[in-house]
Image (cartoon, rainbow, N blue to C red):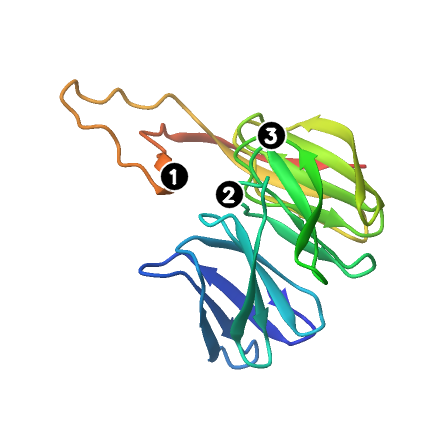
Amino acid sequence: MYDEPDDKIVLTNHSRPIGTLTALDPKTGDIVATVELDDTAPEGAAADGRGHIFVNNEGKHTIQVIDVKTWRATASWPLAPCEGPTGIAYDKASNRIFSGCSKTSVVVDPSTGKVVASIANGTRVDALGWDPGKKLIYIPNGGEGNVTVVHQDSPDKYTVVATVATFAGAKTITVDPRTHNVYLFQPERGPAPVPPADAPPPPTGPGGRGRGPQGPIVAAWFIVIKP
């Protein structure tokens, strides 16, 4: 992500023995800071423009707060009932963080670190879109092949207004704040090859997840949602 107020490119890195956040100078490409996090699987990050960066920790089900003056983690907030937070956005007008999670996404008040609202959605969420002009949150559900569209009625009240069919596996999303168009993309795969009868099972990732064998890419989908 690009932290415009602080003029830094911010990377979150799945790594062992611990995940990290790396800050880069966009003019020189130099690394200006590396912050160790609580989890090996940090995901999305968002800046509030007030000297803080919020990072979703997928494995720990938390948000960590990074102080951009000292480049140190200053707080860690539990996100229950959220599990596996990935996509994230910050709304300056309402001072709220939106954290996209599998099955139940959450809204956090950064002044307290508390979850103030929850949103029912689908599975295999890996991103989150926010349109501040329309006050709409877009949660892409790769498992179901759809997007949950949520309206911010007030800082602590949210209403699901639509479920838009997309394509199975589509879970990367972005919003154009000028046109209000929403974009997703997803490759389409053919049948997976049949493994030999004596082949060992595929290795699993964090939380017991594993891709297993995949078929060849036969097409690619670029999807546009117009509100």
> Is residue 165 positioned above or below 203 on the image?
above
* Quadrant of the rendered image containing residue 69: bottom right
Quarter of the rendering occupied by the N terminus: bottom right
> Is residue 111 positioned above or below 192 on the image?
below
**Residue bearing mark 3:** 122
Q: Position of residue 66 (x, y in %)?
A: 57, 69
Q: Residue at x 35, y 30 (%)?
A: 214
- Horizontally, residue 200 falls left or right of residue 160, namely left
What is the CA distance from the residue labelled 1 to the residue labelled 2?
A: 9 Å
On residue 4, the disc is none
Q: Residue at x 46, y 71 (%)?
A: 35
**Residue bearing mark 1:** 207
Give the amino acid at mark 1: Gly
- Horizontally, residue 54 falls left or right of residue 137, namely left
Say which of 220 and 23 sits in front. Answer: 23
Q: Residue at x 17, y 21 (%)?
A: 196
Q: Residue at x 53, y 76 (%)?
A: 71
> Is residue 46 positioned above or below 35 on the image?
above
